[in-house]
Amino acid sequence: IERGARDVHILVIGDSTGNNDNEWPRLFASWIAQQYPTHSVSYRVWSSTDYASAVAVAAGSGARTIRIWNGSIAGSQPSHLMGEHWANAIGTPFASTPPDLVVWNHGHNLLGLTDEVLRGQFLGPMEQVRLAFPGAPHAMIAQAPDQTNDTYAQIAAQIMRVCSDRGDTLVLDVYSQVMALGKPGSLYVDSIHPSEAGTQIYLGAVTAAWTSARIQPFA
């Protein structure tokens, strides 16, 4: 982006904590438009079997575009876009230009699994994307916990383990931030989905990592 060498593509693979316009991926699109006024910003969110039409978030002063592909689906697991939806979600959009960043935002729909099975639920889809795009850097969001119980602790631990084992995957740790605050109700609209204040923690984790990466890249 800094060099304006080509258009930039960012892929988000996630669940219902990121599929609405008031949640972090869409807000990130607006934030990144402010950081790079020379670039146009395009945003597309998944809709059933393909991405919806592109939303023009900003018109830049230059010729380059930052394209954000939000593959977030309510009730989904990390593998949702890896089968019949692969072509429309990942294969075709990135056929000529691989994603410059892949952000995984999953966990709440992976309850009741053993540690090893849970770990495999993350690693399998991640490896499929890595095989297709070996040079693409990855980041994983450790999501805010369920406000009413501690079930996400196991999931967060396995996200940390996956990132540690890979050694090249950045953790965006929303979980620890919300736990440190005591899981206040003001961060939720129900027991899982973030309120406006909760969304700001998700967004802050992503933008802080992005700002850091401008100095020290993801990979």
Image (spheres, rainbow, N blue to C red):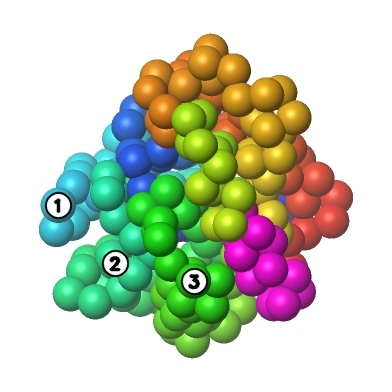
Which class describes the residues within 10 Å of circle 3: few (<14), some (14-19), or many (20+)? Answer: few
Q: Quadrant of the C terminus?
A: bottom right
Q: Residue 114 carries which label?
A: 3
* Badge 2 element: helix
First-in-chain label (2 vs 3): 2
Q: How far apart are marks 1 and 2 (CA)?
A: 11 Å
Write the start and end of the magenta stretch as one range: 156-169
Amino acid type at mark 1? Ser
Which class describes the residues within 10 Å of circle 1: few (<14), some (14-19), or many (20+)? Answer: few
Mark 2 in CB contact with mark 3 (< 8 angstroms): no
Is 166 contained in the magenta span?
yes
Which residue is drawn at the image coordinates 34% and 41% (left, top)?
Answer: 16
Against 139, is 150 above or below?
above
* Badge 3 element: loop
Q: Which mark is residue 48?
A: 1
First-in-chain label (3 vs 1): 1
* Badge 1 element: loop
Furthest toward the left, the residue is: 49
In front of the other: 117 or 194:
117
Task: Identify residue for label 2.
Answer: 81
Residue 128 in picture, x, y percent from top left: 43, 82
Which residue is drawn at the image coordinates 28% and 65% (left, top)?
Answer: 80
Mark yes or no: residue 7 visible: no
In front of the other: 214 or 125:
125
Amino acid type at mark 2? Leu
Furthest toward the right, the residue is: 215
